Image: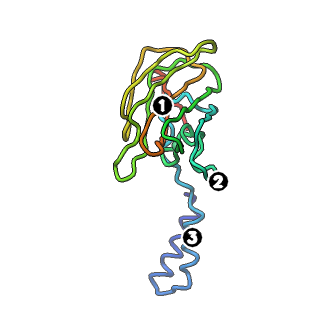
Amino acid sequence: MTNTMNQAKHTIIRGILRGNLALLPALALAAFLAPVQTHAAPPPGWLLAGATATADSEWPDANKKFSAAKAIDGDNATRWASKANIATLEITLAKPATADTLVMREYGEGGQFRVTQFTVEYSDGKDWKPLLNGSTIGRELRLPFKPVKINRLRLKINGTTSPSLWEVQLLDSKKPATKS
Ligand SMILES: [Ca+2]
């Protein structure tokens, strides 16, 4: 927040306190001009900067609101949703990286989560190899594993109605936090 903006806000607020309601639209404008709050910056060791994602099923939306990319954008407020109950999400890293942790956050309507089974495979550039598997994901599932070099990641999920993930994060827990 700049000093100028703060001063402008104070002037507006003083105006309102004096009963000058004509300044209300100006207050709305000041709120509009305030810096946009981003939702939870990517965590330390995040390896998906510049990565791309595709899915064999996406919930149809004209604005691609539920596209595969939303599962790896580092934003906990955007999500990929599958239309089908069984779906595969494939992530290609910008460059191969050594990872040791996978974090998944699942969307649940009214606290009801949908994934009932998942498997995760990785490719080092040649073959697909098994990495992890499990049943439910829920609000947040953090899975450490023996460090491996990963080029691509493939997540297969089985769910009840249209499973959806806020984020799939691949991390190197030993990597220091990056300055934002
Ligand atoms: Ca997201």
State left or right for residue 93 relative to residue 18.
right
State the residue position of label 3.
8
Q: Amino acid at mark 1?
A: Pro
Badge nearest the viewer, 1 or 3: 1
Residue at image position (60%, 40%) is 69
- Rendered position, 67 above or below 136: below
What secondary structure is marked by label 2?
loop
- Packing grade of label 1 (10 A; few <14, some 14-19, many >=20) is some
Name the quarter where the C terminus is drawn.
Answer: top right
Instruction: Tell me, for residue 44, which label it has, or none.
Output: 1
Residue 144 at x, y percent in the picture: 39, 22
Outermost residue, bottom direction? 19
What secondary structure is marked by label 3?
helix
Q: Earlier in the sequence, mark 1 or mark 3?
A: 3
Give how far apart the Cα atoms at labels 1 and 3 are: 36 Å
Q: Earlier in the sequence, mark 2 or mark 1?
A: 1
Q: Amino acid at mark 2?
A: Asn
Give how far apart the Cα atoms at labels 2 and 1 are: 30 Å
Residue at image position (54%, 26%) is 154
Q: Is mark 3 within 8 Å of ligand 1?
A: no
Towards the viewer: 173 or 84:
84
Q: Earlier in the sequence, mark 2 or mark 3?
A: 3
Residue at image position (54%, 39%) is 71
- Rendered position, 95 above or below 20: above
Badge nearest the viewer, 2 or 1: 2
